[in-house]
Amino acid sequence: MISEREIALDIIMETDKGDASHSLIRDVLGKYDYLEPRQKAFIKKLAQGSLERRITLDYITDSFASVKTVKQKPLIRSLLRMSVYQIFYMDQVPDSAAINEAVNLAGKRGFKNLKGFVNGVLRNISRQKDKITFPAPSKKDKKSQITSLSVTYSMPEFICDLFLKNYGYDKTEDILKAFLSPRPVTIRMDERLSKEEMKRLADSMIEESGDNFAIKQHELLPYAYELTHTDNIQYLPGYEEGNWMVQDVSSMLVSEVAGLKKGDVVIDVCSAPGGKALHAAAKLAALEKNAEPCDEKPHVYSRDLTGFKTRIIEENVDRMGFSDIVTVEVHDALEHDEAFENKADVLYCDLPCSGLGIIGRKADIKYGASQKSLKSLSCLQQKILENVWNYVKPGGIMMYSTCTINPYENEKMVDYICENLSFERVDITMSVPSALRNEESLSKGYLQLLPGVYDTDGFFLAKLRRV
């Protein structure tokens, strides 16, 4: 019979090959849905944690192993990472249990000759774990700062360097700490629901969930709620009925700032999984519900590159009951569509990006990023913008957004848009929740959210008007 640790080991080995951890963990837990919630929680924590802390774990192992991690057999390397993670970061697991299970798994998976190596490395680490120290930073030596941050917070050095250049040491350290802090699942309640209906729905989730489940309203938006200790959220009340969907508050701010009006046409050119498009539909539907009838009917066009992506959007559209407002289409944003010229009151450009703002949710992002990939993404963003900018009606709005904290994809891209594509910045100070209104950039038309500051993901948005 396969154990929880063996399931986690298989996940860790696959992510070591470059597979996306968040989707892989979800799929594997779906396969083993018959397990108890505590078992699935153990597997998820062990697999995610071993990936998140990979650089730190390898540093610790290399301090004790005669064969360094880069030269180890893939299974042994993954097994050591998983075991060192338990020793350092899972207090409820006795060191002896982590070590014995690792030795047994090495033998079970065909490496009986390496059981002694695994046992020796892990026992030495366990005995001396309180004496292990990480590289210390020097105020005058940037290289030492990069090394210290990389090892301590398990972040590739080039990303530490990028953040240091843009945010300084203290803010960079805060960002990296936030990435390693547990994040709740955030959901957006349908704004067609009344406050009382949202409250009743939240109460019903508590009633039908486990003892550890918790839900609370987010401080920034009244229809945003944070869930913790969740298991199979699709089984929570209101999911099948389309009363809510998973979406971070930072992403919700796009439709909050857009200033949608009754009868607006919204085009979302890179829409999957559809959170922003469906939020726009919810706001437009709420406006229709609470206003006098008029001839102009609202509509949202939700587009993305492949049928796989648009099927995800269509599932959410059907579940949430927006088929009459939302049209989902397969379309490459790099291909200009003349039929869409001057059509949109509001254009959503949530473009492909490096994702450096959501590393806390998708740890595999940091290991797949490179300086070359960041540069190519900026070029791709410019090409898409050059193809879609005139979908906006004169006087209409472009909402540009990314889930990164890289200025070259954010502030500098806004500069590019305003200098080359006939747009001007719109002051968004009064469009954001009051808790955000001290941000100096709002008068310049944009908002950069850093991880952990307002209990959101890292995210960027800008509001621009076509002139």
Image: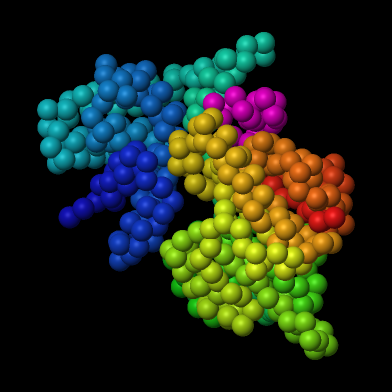
Q: Is residue 378 left or right of residue 424?
A: left
Vertically, is 82 above or below 166?
A: below
The residue at the point 32 percent across, 47 percent down is 11
Q: Is residue 69 left or right of residue 105?
A: right
Dividing the picture into quarters, in which one does residue 342 lie?
bottom right
Vertically, is 84 above or below 285?
A: above
User: Which residue of the protein is positioned furthest toward the top in this rendering?
Assistant: 140
The residue at the point 60 percent across, 24 percent down is 161
- Residue 298 belongs to magenta span: no
Q: Is residue 303 left or right of residue 96?
A: right
The residue at the point 58 percent across, 61 percent down is 271
Dividing the picture into quarters, in which one does residue 129 lie?
top left
User: Which residue of the protein is positioned furthest toward the front in this rendering?
Assistant: 338
User: Looking at the image, which is closer to me, 113 or 297?
Assistant: 297
Residue 130, x across and y down, in percent: 44, 23
What type of secondary structure mainly makes up the magenta span?
helix
Residue 149, x across and y down, in percent: 56, 25
Residue 456, x across and y down, in percent: 66, 50
Q: Inspect this view and state whether residue 320 appears.
A: yes
Residue 139, x across and y down, in percent: 67, 14
User: Looking at the image, which is closer to me, 341 or 428?
Assistant: 341
Q: Which residues are magenta?
A: 158-176
User: Looking at the image, which is closer to me, 435 or 38?
Assistant: 435
Q: Split into 4 quadrants, where in the image is the N terminus?
A: bottom left
Q: Split into 4 quadrants, where in the image is the C terminus?
A: bottom right
